[in-house]
Amino acid sequence: MSEERVRPALTAGRKKGWYGTWLPRAAMITLVAGGAALATVWVLASISDFLLTLAISFFLAFAMLPAVQWLTEKWNWRRGAATGAVMVAGALIGAVFVFAILNVVIGQASGIANSLPETIDRLTGWLNRTFDMQIDTSTWNLSSDAVQGWLQDHGSDILGGALGLTSSVFGIIFRLMTVGLFLFYILADFPRLRAAVGRRMPQNQQKTFDHITQITVDKVGGWVYSRGLLAAISALFSSIAFLIIGLPYPLAMGLWVGVISQFIPTVGTYIAGAVPVIIALMSGDPLDAVWVIVAITIYQQIENYLISPRVTKNTMDLHPAVAFGAAIVGASLLGGFGALIALPFAAAVTVIVQEYTHGYDLVASDVMESPGEYEARMAAKKQAKAAKKAAKKRA
């Protein structure tokens, strides 16, 4: 037999290596999976605005749902009418806040444009007298002619900014209309939406779905209403304090402090307090800014120790570190709106985990004391200190 005939027979009898069978298959799977992942990322990036609009709509729906249910169940309103009434009330509250803030912004901008040189002279004079500083504003050119010249030089930039602002305003109006439409249908047809989702689940899973949905609605709605009540109390106190101090626009500034301090997590108090302090400085009397800081600090202590625990004890049970981390994660994912909705959803997730996981008794540790032991030790220390103080008084 010739060598040419033997070689094909040996080759045919030889098995393919693993790479001959699995390598093409693995390459095909990798290509398909990579293509699917890229397509998914592209689709999500393309509809990110829509997903954000939907998330805003569901958050507002969960916040308004308790009020809609209250009107339909207690007062026998039709669901569409109850939804419309709650949405109109929410829109009016938002419009009042926006109008008050715009009034402040427009008034302050006009005042700054007219009295900028005088305000700077008063402020620098106070700094020079109080802190023995040597600030000389005589070399600063802040006359109206200089301002007009600056406006002429930067007119095209200002026009471009105005056009961009107009486009942004129309974009915001369109998003508000879209959110309003989704919000109305979610609230008005929530029972149908629940039924449509529930029919795709077994009966035991439907009960779990209902329970999780109710927990989420309770936490989101409770958080919004408790924050709203705290904002109203804070706005009332701040408005009265600012009126006594003599701050310009006391009602608008009180609304600003109340809303921003309660609805922006972690840093809301500092942002809310900074604006009236700046306006007090611009009004020409820096001592007013000190009184504003004092008033905000006093109310913050009253709220932290007396008001907030009573208002939020049944709505938010969240550790401060968890709340801070949730706000950071929410802001990273969805910006300011993500930071806003992170706290109620973190509270809902905490309750769901507690409901559907099993807890165990804590084993005594020789290394670290338990929270109960720590609280008992602190209470005993406080009692001993009080007894010692009472003994000194008797002596």
Image (tube, grey):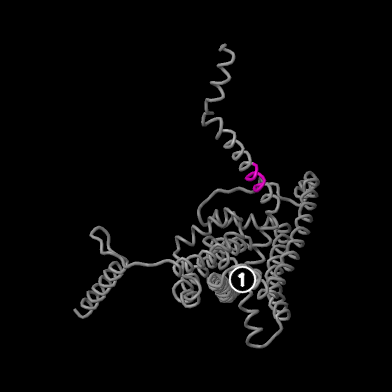
How would you classify the magenta stretch by its main secondary structure? helix
What is the x, y in percent for residue 201? 59, 68
Query: Looking at the image, which is closer to me, 51 or 371?
Result: 51
The region drawn magenta spans 35-41
Magenta stretch holds residue 136: no
Can you see residue 230?
no
Q: Against 328, is 107 above or below?
A: below
Position of residue 190 in the picture relative to residue 149 (left or right): left
Residue wearing tag 1? 198
Seen from this angle, which residue lies furthest top?
2
Label 1 neighbourhood size at 10 Å, few (<14), some (14-19), many (20+)? some
Q: The disc labelled 1 sits on which kind of residue?
A: Gly
Seen from this angle, which residue lies furthest left?
395
What is the x, y in percent for residue 157? 77, 46
Query: Looking at the image, which is closer to me, 143 or 43?
Result: 43
The quadrant the C terminus occupies is: bottom left
Query: Looking at the image, which is closer to me, 35 or 339?
Result: 35
Image point (45%, 60%), residue name: 321
The residue tagged with tag 1: helix, strand or loop? helix
Position of residue 251 in the picture relative to residue 351 (left or right): right
Image point (58%, 66%), residue name: 263
What is the x, y in percent for residue 146? 75, 47
Query: Looking at the image, which is closer to me, 138 or 352?
Result: 352
Find residue 253 and report its image quarter: bottom right
Seen from this angle, which residue lies furthest bottom?
75
Can you see residue 204?
yes
What is the x, y in percent for residue 107? 72, 64
Magenta stretch holds residue 40: yes
Find residue 73 and report its image quarter: bottom right
The quadrant the N terminus occupies is: top right
